[in-house]
Image (spheres, rainbow, N blue to C red):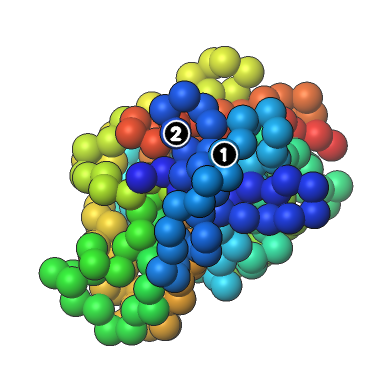
Amino acid sequence: MRFVRFAIGSTIGYGLAEDDGSIGAITSTPFLPWQPTNERFEREQVRVLAPVLPSKVVAVGLNYRAHAEETGMPLPEEPMIFLKPSTSVIGPEETIYLPPQSKRVDHEGELAIVIGRAARNVSEKDAPGVILGYTCANDVTARDLQGKDVQFTRAKGFDTFCPLGPHVETGLDPHSLELICRVNGEVRQKSSTSDLVFAPAALVAFISSVMTLLPGDVILTGTPAGISPLNDGDVVEIEISGIGVLRNPVSA
């Protein structure tokens, strides 16, 4: 299933993305019991939003072997985690704004895990049972501020720095998905989730041993090699096989 969060007028709802491009509304959210309704909308009738509004976004650094190599950093012995605020989340086609405080803002295409139910101290074996599904993400980063500040809060936390979408794909095997990031049609990142140091189940187990994960929370699993700057007027796309394409324009 492909869960979509959308707005029509002042009403926000959830639905299922159909193969013909339409959206079939459901009675509730994916995190509660729901039923399909008779309401169906064409894509041009609605505004597709970020598929979830998380209480927190937990991101993981240096989780692709090739990315660790390009940064000259050793592979971590355990997941290196940090937080992005919920206010950084935007949806498909929404604009990434380049903050005046930074001279270099990079894209980071990532596979995102969407948590389906509350999870605390979940084992790696049981972790798939708390995952609703997966979506595309862009862990936008002010690279110069990251180096200046050492820690990541400011560099990763600006408004619009966490595009998510276009929907949550359920029933997906996350272990060998192709991930491509394009800027203005040019491929900048191309890899497979088979290069992850820590797989999604291991990340859920580790993070849930630190903090309670709530329904709708998002885990960004890390970015592969090929990070590069974004500039005013660019269009950045994150495409993951089995999910789709997350597209966002960039503006100063």
**In this orientation, which residue lies closer to the viewer: 226 or 157?**
157
Q: What residue does disc 2 label? A: 18
Q: Position of residue 32 (x, y in %)?
A: 44, 70
Looking at the rendered structure, the kind of residue marked 2 is: Glu
| Contact (Cβ within 8 Å) of mark 2 with mark 1 | yes
Disc 2/disc 1 C-alpha distance (Å): 10 Å
Q: What residue does disc 1 label? A: 40
Looking at the rendered structure, the kind of residue marked 1 is: Arg
Q: Residue at x 57, y 72 (%)?
A: 55
Q: Which numbered mark, 2 or 1, is in the foreground of this view?
A: 1
**In this orientation, which residue lies closer to the viewer: 199 or 127?**
127
Q: Is residue 181 above or below residue 123?
A: above
Q: Residue furthest top?
A: 185
Q: Is residue 139 visible?
A: no
Q: Is residue 45 visible?
A: yes
**In this orientation, which residue lies closer to the viewer: 66 or 165?**
165
Q: Residue at x 29, y 73 (%)?
A: 206
Asked where in the image residue 175 lies, by quadrant, the reply is top left
Q: Position of residue 185 (x, y in %)?
A: 57, 15
Q: Residue at x 56, y 66 (%)?
A: 54
Please tell me whether mark 2 sits on a helix, a strand or a loop: loop
**In this orientation, which residue lies closer to the viewer: 7 or 124?**
7
Q: Is residue 20 above or below residue 78?
A: above
